[in-house]
Amino acid sequence: YKYYIDSYQKEFNRYYIFYSPLEKEFVYQRNLGGHRFEYGLKDKESFNKARYEELLPFLHWKNLDIQNKLPILIDEKSFDKDSIKSFRLSLSYNPKMLKEREVKIYPLLNPTSKVAMIKFPEEVFSFNSKIANVYDFDSKMRNKKLTKELNNLLKEVDFNFPVKEIFGKATNIKPYDRGYLIIDGKNRAYNLTRVDDEMKLNRLKSINSDSDIFFMKISENRQKKLLGYAIDSKSNFYILDWNFNLKELKLKEFDYKSMKLQLISNPLYYLIRYDDGENYYATVFDRKFNLISSIKMR
């Protein structure tokens, strides 16, 4: 039963909160159960689904496209299908993501600069308490050459064992590869990459060793603006830009231990929603991450 709950049970969301670029207010869909929903603006009368979708053109742009209602003019700016699609991005967090990997082995990606598609890697790497090891995927044997190369890089940057955390999107199904972000024993951050058979390990001074970052979500995307997000031990939330710089975003009452979170991007805003199943929050920022408004619903 516990395995089912952890792995398969569908979560019940009482509210889905968005921000309307037309009304400049939060719009919600309330789940009443039994496939029944209520739609409305905060502290205002509810309305039907058609009006709800009309107020969220960046969310329901496909319907507008079919109805030949694109491009749409908002704040004297025109948005067509392609411009809306180009800004779409979603990053999520769930406390379940904190569960430790059973096997800490990572594919050693090796993009070719003259080829668009990232080839599935033939090597994987792992760390023990003293050194790093690289293994050939097919033979399962240690690759002595790459193991030596990686450990030499670690010595050059005065890397401190044991490794505290390793973050990265461990798949070749992505448009770009920014490598792995590795936190060493002194809480210093390093970026490990391999391109055209050349490995590089760079210290990331933009991530302060005193920040106590313990979780990161890295997700390369075609926008090349946001690389992901980070959370520290005090539940402070940061966005991570393409160059590994952190910017803290104030999220009132966010608790990483009990709340799931979603960051949604559109052409005008960044919306962050988070909840614990009882209290539902949403905060909206402009494209430069200046705070616009926030809301709490129960």
Image (tube, rainbow, N blue to C red):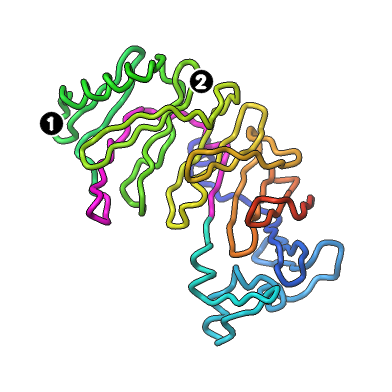
Label 1 CA crowd tier, 10 Å (few <14, some 14–19, many 20+)? few
Nearest the eye: 294 or 278: 294
**Local secondary structure at mark 2:** loop
Q: Left of 280 or right of it: where is 288?
A: left
Q: Is residue 10 above or below residue 59?
A: above
**Local secondary structure at mark 1:** loop
Nearest the eye: 222 or 126: 222
**Which residue is at the far top?**
130
Q: Left of 276 or right of it: where is 139?
A: left
**Which residue is at the far bottom?**
68
Amino acid type of the residue that numbered disc 1 sits on in the rendered structure: Ser
The part of the image, by quadrant, that contains residue 293 is bottom right
Task: State the image coordinates of residue 158 (x, y, percent, origin top left).
Answer: 38, 15
The part of the image, by quadrant, that contains residue 125 is top left
Residue drawn 74% across the image and 68% down it: 39
The part of the image, by quadrant, that contains residue 268 is bottom right
Task: State the image coordinates of residue 23 (x, y, percent, origin top left).
Answer: 77, 70
Task: State the image coordinates of residue 237 (x, y, percent, origin top left).
Answer: 64, 38
Main SS class of the magenta portion in the image:
loop
Q: Report if residue 129 is visible in the image.
A: yes
Residue drawn 23% across the image and 54% down it: 115
Amino acid type of the residue that numbered disc 2 sits on in the rendered structure: Asn
Q: Which residue is mark 2?
A: 187
Q: State which region is magenta.
A: 90-118
Q: Which residue is mark 1?
A: 139
Q: Left of 224 or right of it: where is 250?
A: right
